[in-house]
Image (spheres, grey):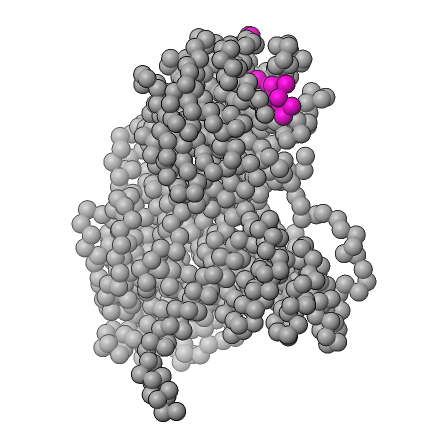
Amino acid sequence: MDYKFRNLLGAPYKGGSVAMTGDTLLSPVGNRVSQIDLVKSTSSTLPYELGSHVRTLCVSPDGVFLFAVDETGRALVINRKHNALLHHFSFKNVVRTARFSPDGKYIAVGVGRLVQVWHRPGLAKSTNPLELHRTYGHCHADIVSLDWSDDSCWLVAGSKDLTVRVWSLHSIDTYLPPTLTGHKESPIGVYFTTKNIRESAELLGKNVPHLYTLSKDGALFAWHYAKDKVGDEDTDKDDAEQSRTYFGGHWSLVDKYYFNQRGSKMTACTVHKGVGILAVGFSRGLFELLQLPDLTTVHTLSIGHDPIDSMCFNDSGEWVVVGSANLGQMLVWEWRSETYVLKQQGHAYDITSLDFSQDGSMIVTGSTDAKVKLWTVANGFCFVTFSDHAAPVTATSFVPSGHAVVSASLDGTVRAFDLIRYRNFRTLTSPKPVQFTSVGVDPSGDIIVAGSKDTFEIFVWSLKTGKLLDILAAHEGPVVMTKFAPGSSILASASWDATVRTWDVFNSKGNVDVLQHNHDVLAVAWHPDGKHLASSTLDGQIYYWNAVDADIEFVIHGRRDIAGGRSKYDRRAAGNSSSGRAFTSLAFSADGSFLLAGGSSKYVCVYDVREQVMLRRFQISHNKALDGVLDQLNSKYMTDAGPLTDIRDVNSDDDEHDETARRLPGDVSYQSQGSMTTRCVSLSPTGRTWAAATPGGVLLYGLDSTMTFDPTDLAEDITPAAVLQSMNVGAYLRALLIAVRLGDGDLIQQVLLCTPPTMLPSVVATLPSSAIVPIIQSLGDIMNSGTPHIEHVIAWLQQVCTRHALVLQDMSHQVGPALRGIHKALNQVRDDVGGLCESNIYSLRYLISSK
């Protein structure tokens, strides 16, 4: 039962700043942080949670430290290299922006009206990794933007009081921070210029800008700094700690530029100082790229009609990341080639159903946004989306062969999707329009059944012909779930009429048995032996039935197990109220030893079937922004008109866009705060992973395999020195195996590059299957590092793929990301070489002819 959090799938982008470090995109998903490797095409989620939705992210220049702050001012400091949580911290106020200094030694944080500069955490152990360096408090409203100078000695901040201020990192006698004014709306971006931008301005004959400021109304101001001729003689002398670049002079406004986007506001901006590119986003879904300092438009693109909330560049400036919270979409655009690098979008609304494929490598999800998505468990990516339904999807299931999925919807159709051609190849309907709430597939994959919400009937179709074979009518309430017994033709259907009915579909015997309950039945699940089943009812109980004799073997009273969390609308405390707490989804393990149960609560419970006791209870989220997570509510947030969070004042400063401010006070129709419930749970057939569909996405939990003890790896000669010694004597196979056992990627790469090409066939032929995955991953890292040894890497790949093809096929989910990264790197090399040859084609022809 040592299940650990592994990943989060299907969570849409809902706001907050994004960041890029190397080829990795960091984005907030609820109260967690997601990492997307754009080269290897893998997505993972850090296993750490904040108390509320993540609002601010920033990464150190070396990519090691991640600083994440939520809406309430609570922060996490994470070491990304070792995936270790270093420190919890609370700023006790709203943090709207944070920025690491270019040298990586400091981090500036806008805490309300203050700017605090902290020392970066060091490698030494400390009870307080964050040490405050200095606090600046001259602003009269919240800080919304920050930036550092190139020498990390000067700091500029934009505030909601429509001013921009410049501070020195260290104290300078007689220095008074200047206040730059002129903007008519709040500045959303402030940026120091670099030497390259200033030199370009001089070549163009323009006034040299030292600072750019951008505001919501689409105004860009360029500021020039000039030293005073009469002043202190020491103003030009820099001391050891503090430069005096912006001391002893004055600032002046030298240029203005207005983005004429009628009817829209500027909502996001970012600058890549190395390339000299400015990116701005607007409230109508348009973003624009401009070249600095002449501000000529390079590129313009629209991603919809919803506001752009966050933007950033990658290190090279070739990719721009655009995030829109209303769309729930994250877009990575390569502006030079005008192509998408990433266009990932989760479900816009709650996920209602999910199911694992037979091998556990894929997950299908259905949502109230009327879409069906398929996900790869290994890399966390959605690889296909079906949008054929016209109403919310209520149930999804894989066909046992794994070549198709079926989904039921409230639009009155059951659709089957082909996973080879990715199309809707069969649409099943009823004689009269009904709303389907459940779907089931028999073990052979030939029969599809679906239960209806309004006519209380079960419809039976043939998947091959699409014909309606039978209508099973006996229930007196909505049929909420239909499940076939494993390896049998017996169908179990659960209904709100307080019964579970079993049917023999193939022999046309109709209703076999009626399993009577005292309350409405919400879920049913078959035991793997096909002779027992479990059902959950509205009173929070789980019944374990002998389906052959139609007898109850035992009852699990789970209402108190699932109880927890108080809704903001509850009149009773969480400890005194268990009404409405029930399990809405059940799933047995592959061996039937334990039962997974989730429902209208923040908990997912695991029960031992033989002992009838709860083994463990997982809390699926600690996000206090979701309703039903807290056990105790603060009475100061309750008013006569209802919860204070449901009331939005027109004059609130937290309104991000004008569209929100135009809504009437008290209007709660736009509130997106969900209730913490589990709509569906499912266990992988392998038993190593289980998933839960929640308002925040699909949570994946897996067994922790990183701590597996292998006594063969314990030996005194397994050291890095032994690797070098083995290479010196020509024992490259032994050196490679030692490096693999050590798990040192740099050592593995060194051995791979040092192995002579003539020895590759003999080395690869004797490699054990356990070493194939780390070798492929290391070859991918070598290719992505821009190595000149391309032919040597291709030779390694050819030998490994030829002699270990079956191993690669079985471990495709582990080596797939590395192989995709190698494929992208080879395509890039081909394009570079092809372009070089094309540009020098006449020179090549001359050299050939001269021979």
Residue 602, quarter of the rendered image: top right
Q: Going by the image, does 389 lie left or right of 41?
A: left
Comparing 216 with 133, the one in front is 216
Whether residue 440 is situated above or below residue 171 in the rendered picture: above
Comparing 484 with 610, the one in front is 484
Q: Going by the image, does 129 lie left or right of 56?
A: right
Residue 411 in view in this figure: yes
Residue 271, quarter of the rendered image: bottom left
Q: How many marks?
A: 0
Q: Is residue 521 magenta?
A: yes
Residue 576 in view in this figure: no
Going 42% across and 66% down the picture, which residue do you hit?
A: 828
Going 60% across and 38% down the picture, which residue do you hit?
A: 689
Q: Is residue 168 magenta?
A: no
Residue 439, quarter of the rendered image: top left
Query: In this view, which residue lies farthest toward the bottom?
Result: 850
Q: Going by the image, does 145 lie left or right of 730?
A: left
Residue 675 spot, x, y in % from top left = 46, 28
For the magenta stretch, what is the residue range? Answer: 516-536
Going 72% across and 75% down the picture, which residue do you hit?
A: 730
